[in-house]
Image: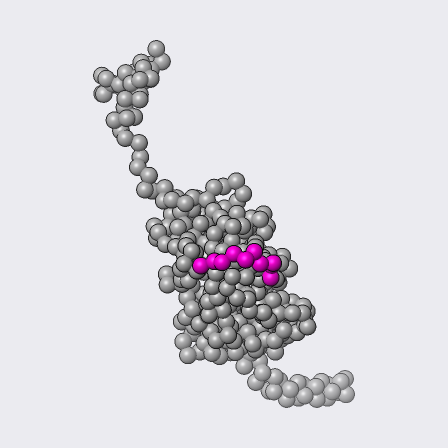
Amino acid sequence: VPIVFERLKEKDAEWRKVKVDLDKEWKAMLSDNVEGSLDVQCHFYKRELEKCFTADWLLGECQRAKSFGKHPSKIPKHPAIDRLQPEFALVNEDVELSLYQPHVSVPISQNMPHKDALDCLGALFSTDSSKSESNNEKFVVVWKDFISPWFGLPSEWIARYPRTSNSPDRSASTVKFVVGQRVRTVVGDGQIISVIDGAIPNTFQYLIKFSFGVGYVRPSAVAHLLPSNNTQIDESSANKAQLMTDNLQIIFGTEKIYLMVRLYVLLVTMLLHAKDMAGVGYSRILSSLKDLIVGKIDAKDFETDCRKLAKTNVFHYASIPHLVEACADAIVKVADEDAVDTLYHCSRLKLKDLSLLRSLSLEVTEGAVYHIQILHSGGRILFSYLPNGVNLQLSNPRETKPPDSDRAFSSSKSEGRTLEGREGQPEAKRIKVESK
């Protein structure tokens, strides 16, 4: 017994010595986690916010825009998603937009942190082991050929993420055609009316006359030269009044394109709100977010870093990594679908005739049922669901006058329904008179 007692005393002394060192680590961990343990709403708010990033939620918003526009009380509401709530409308009164279908509207601006969104997506595609080199290539192509020009972003941003394969760059043009030549494009055969230089050096586009009208075409949309028919063409013969302004862009996209655009807009919106809420701490939160994406820290450490820099709305920051992954997956799916390039070429025709634009898009794929348009000066992007069989509304239905009341009265008399002497009768007698 004395031997065992002495041994226990030695062990107790060893434990007390080790405990002193461990107390320092435990106190630091408890200090970091005490505020998180008191924030009981963070987990539930984060889960509620992440519902907004699912395909079912986003598709439901667009497809039920008419119901939500008529009955705003049916719109799902929660404190976590108040900042991200879109607007639902039955008709847009802006004549320039020509959008007379029920639609969803969300704010967008070139002043939003698009560069930060690109850096987060680029970090994910460059370092995540689940993303192959081919996916990184898809990301670069989709960003360069669609996202960057659609949102009016600088093309040099993507230069930091070079193409990893030896496949040819579809956006690069090695041949410059001249006025009068007939060419084959992805939207049909036509004759070049003029070559228009872009605002960026060494960039240009063609104004081409097709059988259905005139439209703008990017060099990457021109496949090859056709035999000349020796027909002289005058630029003045082109009716440019049939074309949209550069301020407006409209595309009829597929479900995958719609989801990608919605998720990307959500990402830049979330980053903008994070920037507004965190203030000077935003740069440190963004740095910690990139560390999480590349695997230097885990989600718990990221949440702890956010909590140190911002005492409130931590659920907002903690849900951004999930949104980055969702947006990256959507970009890969759009690239695999391989329809966005041709559909965007149709969009770049700048046709004011939306019925013709829709027909051209449906010839590319029957899935082009989402009407997406952005007015850069208006600061909003709009989405409308137009499945096959639903006609495109080309005029404002609110401008149609209701039937004249006198005409309705005379019509009812012609049907043999006498309305005289009915005032003041109880409802039961009124029904009885009608039954005779």
Figure colour scheme: one colour
Residue, x 41% and y 66% (percent of image)? 109
**Residue 8, percent from left and from top:** 71, 85
Left or right: where does residue 27 sit relative to residue 431? right
In the picture, which quadrant includes the N terminus? bottom right
**Residue 79, percent from left and from top:** 42, 59
Of the pair 154 and 57, the residue shown nearer to us: 154
Of the pair 150 and 45, the residue shown nearer to us: 150
- Residue 86 in the image: above or below residue 30: above
- Residue 297 in the image: above or below residue 17: above
Q: Residue furthest front?
A: 230
- Residue 190 in the image: above or below residue 277: above
Residue, x 43% and y 60% (percent of image)? 235
* Magenta run includes residue 312: no
Left or right: where does residue 157 sit relative to residue 7? left
Residue, x 51% and y 50% (percent of image)? 211
**Residue 47, percent from left and from top:** 53, 60
Magenta stretch: give its range: 225-234
Q: Residue furthest top?
A: 436
Q: Main secondary structure of the magenta part?
A: loop
In the picture, which quadrant includes the C terminus? top left
Residue, x 27% and y 29% (percent of image)? 405
* Magenta run includes residue 232: yes
Asked whether residue 323 is in view, the answer is no
Left or right: where does residue 4 sit relative to residue 217? right
**Residue 278, percent from left and from top:** 42, 74
Of the pair 10 and 24, the residue shown nearer to us: 24
Asked whether residue 196 is in view, the answer is yes
Of the pair 101 and 121, the residue shown nearer to us: 101
